[in-house]
Each structure stands twice: as structure tokens, then as C-alpha cells.
Image (cartoon, grey):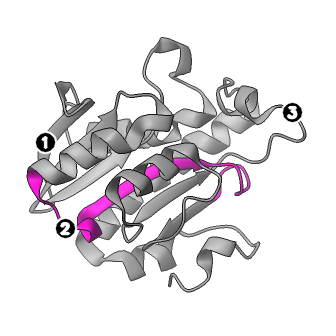
Amino acid sequence: MHVIAGLGNPGKKYEKTRHNMGFLVLDEFAAKHGIRVSKIRHKALTGEGMVNGEKVLLVKPQTYMNLSGESLREVMSYYDVPIENLIVIYDDLDLATGDLRIRKKGSSGSHNGMKSVIYQLQDDGFPRIRIGIGSSGGDDWKDYVTGPVSGKEAEILAETIKKAADSIDCILTDGMDIAMNRFNTGKKKDPEDEGND
């Protein structure tokens, strides 16, 4: 079984914000495969299904971003899933808007949700899919990440959300290496790339 977790903040206020890219990708993937993510357990909204012959558990922690790890610790412990079978999807300020970056493992960077996940799991050896939301350009980063997306930025991110959902399928069927080669975008060298290929 694979656990696929999208990070975000619950509630209508945060629905279409930059910080909810993980939720939005998970929603896209769930819709694509006819999986309802509606059962409340382990401090999360969850949904189970079969994808390409593989059982998957989709997880949207409802703890608010900074405590996301509490939910995932419960899930991973309850299902006794190997760490490499966890895929976490989240937004990233350090990547240009619309860039997509898949990695086998790595640090949390500046992302508080990922800091919580790694702290609670005591392990950073799980795959992750990062959605670039661009930098705040000097504005307060908290206001920026929880701000709404519109116009051209919304179009770019909508396309990236679809690609990210497709990349999950690729990971499940073809493996991480092929998914990274096929879906990773962005020209700048990313510090997280070091030693993670």
C-alpha cells in the first residue's frame, strides 16, 4: 500500500490558496481515479482505492499545516507502511511558480508542514512532490502563502496541479527515477537535488 498525503490548511478560507497545493493535487488525483476523500480518521480526511493494481490511501491532514506530522505519524503507525511508500505533496516558495520537483528524500527546507512531518516520523527518507509557488517578493511570506491565486498565476498552477497528479500515477507504475526524469521542471539548481537522485 502507498500513503499519498497532500499538505494544506482545512476550511473554506484556505481552499484556493498557494499553501494548499498539496490538497489541490490530491483532489485532482482522487477525482481522476474516482476516490472519495471524505472519511475522517487519524486527524485527516482520507479515502482508499486501487490505482493501477496498487492499494492507495489518500490523506489530507486536518490539523493545520504546522501540525501535519501528527496526522501522518498516526497513519503510518496504524497501517505499518514502509517509509518509502509515503508520498507527500506540498507547496514550495523556493521553486518558481509552476515548477514541479519530485525527490526521493530530503530535508524540510523552509516548509513548516514538512518540518512537522519529518519531526513526527523521525525520518526524511520518503518521496515528495513539490509545487513551486514562487517567492513572496519581499511581502510577508505568511500572507503570501495563504493568499488567493488568480489570473495567469492560477492558470500556471492549475496546469502544474494536473501534471503533479499524473506524476503520482507514474511513481506508482514506473517508479521514482522515471517520474523524476519525466516530470521534474525548472532550470535553477535546487539545493534539495544534491545527493537525492
**Which callout, 1 or 3, points at the residue further toward the start of the chain?**
1
Q: Which mark is residue 82?
A: 2
Q: What residue occupies the far right of the structure in this picture?
A: 138
Q: Amino acid at mark 2?
A: Pro
**Which callout, 1 or 2, points at the residue further toward the start of the chain?**
1
Residue 29 quadrant: top left
Q: Is 165 part of what is drawn in magenta?
A: no
Q: Is 90 part of what is drawn in magenta?
A: yes
In front here: 74 or 39? Answer: 74
Residue 171 placed where, x, y %?
A: 32, 69
Residue 35 appears in the rendering: no
Q: Amino acid at mark 3?
A: Asp
Quarter of the figure that contains the N terminus: bottom left
Real-space Cα separation, disc 1 to disc 3, in angstroms: 39 Å
The residue that mark 1 highlights is 48
Q: Secondary structure at mark 1?
A: strand
Q: Is residue 108 left or right of residue 104?
A: right
Magenta stretch, residue numbers: 79-99
Residue 138 placed where, x, y %?
A: 90, 39
Real-space Cα separation, disc 1 to disc 2, in angstroms: 17 Å
In front here: 166 or 130? Answer: 130
Q: Which mark is residue 155?
A: none
Q: Residues within 10 Å of mark 1 (few under 14, many from 20)?
A: some
Q: Secondary structure at mark 2?
A: loop
Q: Which mark is residue 139?
A: 3
Say which residue appears at 66% left-offset and 34% top-offset.
154
